Image (spheres, grey):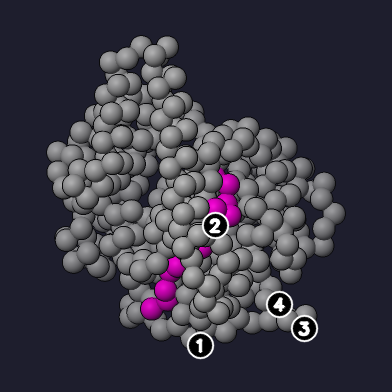
Amino acid sequence: MTRSDPTSGSIGVSAIGSPLVSVVMPLFNSATTVRASLESVLSQTYSHLEILVVDDGSTDASVAICREYDDARLRIIQQGNRGLAGARNTGIRHARGTILAFLDSDDLWLPQKIERHVEHLRSAPAVGLSYSRSAFIDADGKRLGLYQTPPLHAITPELILCRNPISNGSCVVMRREVLDAIHTETTIDGHSHSAWFDESFRQSEDLECWLRISLRTEWRIEGIAEPLTLYRLSGGGLSANTEKQFASWQRVLQKTAGYAPELISRHGERALAYQLRYLARRTIRERQPRQGAKLVHEALRRYPRLLKEEPIRTLITLAAADLGVVLPRRLYGPLEAAMIQITGLMQRLAMGAKMKRKVSVPGSVSGPPEG
């Protein structure tokens, strides 16, 4: 497949002068969180939306909760369970907007989220995929004071492979033209259907899609510095989930190597180390320090330069894992809480300091700059 070129970057507009944004929300047994997620969409300052809730075979009260809302913009589409990629593909298939946004049914958006991204795409015609930084919330929706603060510019396939700056699927808003450029066909129940996310993946489908966009199109990927997405952290069955996630991530490498072998050959080991360190942080956060220590030490064994490339983050992960193994919980708990507070404070200070140094440029997107 050849790399496609961006068009002029124009955004189709309605009679009122605003592009229609199609919000795709996959739904599967999210009765405890979907109300807050849906209300965060209905409360957007940008109102020219259609909201496609794709029920992926829920067996709880999720769909009934969504049907309580009397809003002409809301449509509920039901299907048998096909996973997150399958639900997104169904939503995209039914979408009428020239811009698409994705929100998982346990995450939230700040009210100005869509407005900021529409401004971003209008001001940057070569940008096809716009994402925001995210703030973490816990299972109860409480902010943790921690953020995902990835790079926002010069997003390359190597960076996506090793660091995935886009971070999570709920922070993405993109032009329909980008999806058209990576369109494929898949067979469902004996019938051919359009597909954009690879439905053979039940995890890592986001990363696989972002890599295809970066490698097979000329569209730029760029971020907004404001943490406009609230990303929910939840535990449960992490050990088995970590193994499945790592296996799925390795499948992404295998698929990508089929059409971009040089990328995987040059950066595969480095990407593997970063992924192992990421999984180590997840297991440590879920009170499994022994597994976390094993993962982070394996990352350093495979790619020792990890310590040189990102010394602070790597040393913090090592310390958190090793201290979690040797210290009793009554001592480690307060230390962990203090480390979280310090990390959050450092993130906020860094974002605030760079906001003060921002130079206003005509057509730029408001908010703090890259941190």
**Marks 3/4: CA distance?**
8 Å
Q: Secondary structure at mark 1?
A: loop
Q: Is 312 situated left or right of 4 in this image?
A: left
Q: What residue is shown with label 3? A: 15
Front-most of residues 320 and 78: 320
Instruction: Work out whether residue 27 can be spotted.
Output: no
Give residue 24's position: percent from left, percent from top. Answer: 62, 59
Instruction: Work out whether residue 242 can be spotted.
Output: yes
Give the amino acid at mark 1.
Ser
Mark 2–mark 1 contact, CB under 8 Å? Answer: no
Q: Which label lies toward us, 2 or 4?
A: 2
Residue 347 vertical position relative to residue 92 in the rendered view, above or below = above
Q: Which label lies toward us, 2 or 3?
A: 2
Whether residue 223 appears in magenta in the rendering, the answer is: yes
Q: What residue is shown with label 2? A: 226
| Highlighted magenta segment, given as a residue range | 218-231
Task: Identify which residue is drawn at 72% across, 59% down.
Answer: 44
Q: Is 14 situated left or right of 284 in this image?
A: right
Who comes first in sequence, dot 2 or dot 4?
Answer: 4
Task: Identify which residue is drawn at 21% across, 55% down.
Answer: 268
Q: Secondary structure at mark 4?
A: loop
Mark 4 crowd level (few <14, some 14–19, many ≥20, 10 Å Cα)? some
Give the amino acid at mark 3.
Ala
Q: Identify the image quadrant of the N terminus.
A: bottom left
Front-most of residues 289 and 93: 289
Give the amino acid at mark 4.
Ser
**Marks 2/1: CA distance?**
26 Å
**Marks 3/1: CA distance?**
21 Å
Name the mark on residue 18. 4
Q: What residue is shown with label 1? A: 8
Mark 2–mark 3 contact, CB under 8 Å? Answer: no
